[in-house]
Image (cartoon, rainbow, N blue to C red):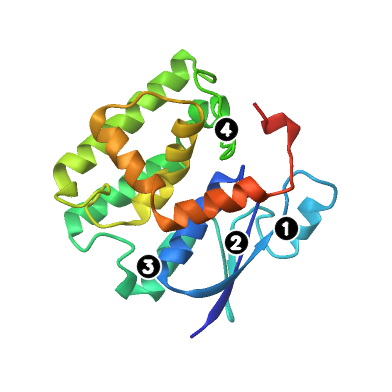
Amino acid sequence: MTKYTLVIGNKNYSSWSLRAWLAVKRSGAEFEEVVIPLFRPGSRDMISTRSPSGKVPVLQGETETVWDSLAIGEYLAERFPEAGLWPADASARAIARSVCAEMHSGFAPLRKGMPMNVRANAPGKGHSAEVDADIARVQEIWQFCRARFGGDDPFLFGAWSLADAFYAPIVSRFRTYGVALSSTCQAYADAVWELPEMQEWAAAAAAEPYLLPEYEL
């Protein structure tokens, strides 16, 4: 089996890295991870030697390099179809791609107002009218997907998919900032957080020695 290298940033802070890492883990691909601490002297140069965009995450294979979390997810879904990274149903798959793309390109106020910090606990912080509008939209997406596609399984489209990887950093943010959720959304967030992979990531984030004061709450 081809071995890959996934280059990511700090696990405590890098939401984009978490998305790609979950996708690789759930694909079943054999890989090693390289963590490059962000925003430190030399970080940009270290990343640029591996990533054409100069950003993380980036997935390096034997014959190709794929950067950007959405592209990495699509690539893995093609290479490892047995992993079921996208829903099998065409309608569900179209909606799953849509909600991933919306997360990928939107929610700037939420990202800025409630930056990911897995090991922090700051209930009540980060709110504004714009952030609260984003929170409401996230819950709307979760409730719609669960109602239409969830069935008896706990994730957005029933079985786990890339859509859950893309909203996993939001789950982490909501925990950090103590965001009140509807019962449906809280049950979904709990299911994501309780995944063994999420627990592995959270434990690694808690153990990291790297500290970015500008992201500490």
x, y percent for residue 180: 37, 23
| N-term-proximal mark, 4 vs 1 | 1
Of helix, strand and loop, which one carries label 2?
A: strand
**Residue in view at x 63 percent, y 54 percent:** 56
User: Splitting the image into 4 quarters, where does residue 137 fall?
Assistant: top left
Residue at the limit of the structure toward the right, as seen here:
41
CB atoms at circles 2 and 1 under 8 Å apart?
A: yes
Q: Distance between the residues labelled 3 and 4?
A: 28 Å
The three-letter code of the residue at mark 4 reads Pro
The crowding category of the residue bearing disc 3, from other C-alpha atoms within 10 Å (few below 14, some 14 to 19, many at least 20), is many
Of helix, strand and loop, which one carries label 3?
A: helix
The crowding category of the residue bearing disc 4, from other C-alpha atoms within 10 Å (few below 14, some 14 to 19, many at least 20), is many
The crowding category of the residue bearing disc 1, from other C-alpha atoms within 10 Å (few below 14, some 14 to 19, many at least 20), is many
210 above or below 116?
Answer: below
x, y percent for residue 173: 49, 34
Of helix, strand and loop, which one carries label 4?
A: loop
| N-term-proximal mark, 1 vs 3 | 1
Report the front residue among 89 and 37: 37
For disc 3, the marked residue is 77
The three-letter code of the residue at mark 2 reads Val
For disc 1, the marked residue is 47
Q: Which mark is residue 115?
A: 4
Q: Is residue 70 visible to the viewer in this orientation of the structure? A: no
For disc 2, the marked residue is 58
CB atoms at circles 1 and 3 under 8 Å apart?
A: no
Q: How far apart are marks 4 and 1 (CA)?
A: 21 Å
x, y percent for residue 59: 57, 66
User: Splitting the image into 4 quarters, where does residue 81 fall?
Assistant: bottom left
User: Splitting the image into 4 quarters, where does residue 147 fall?
Assistant: top left
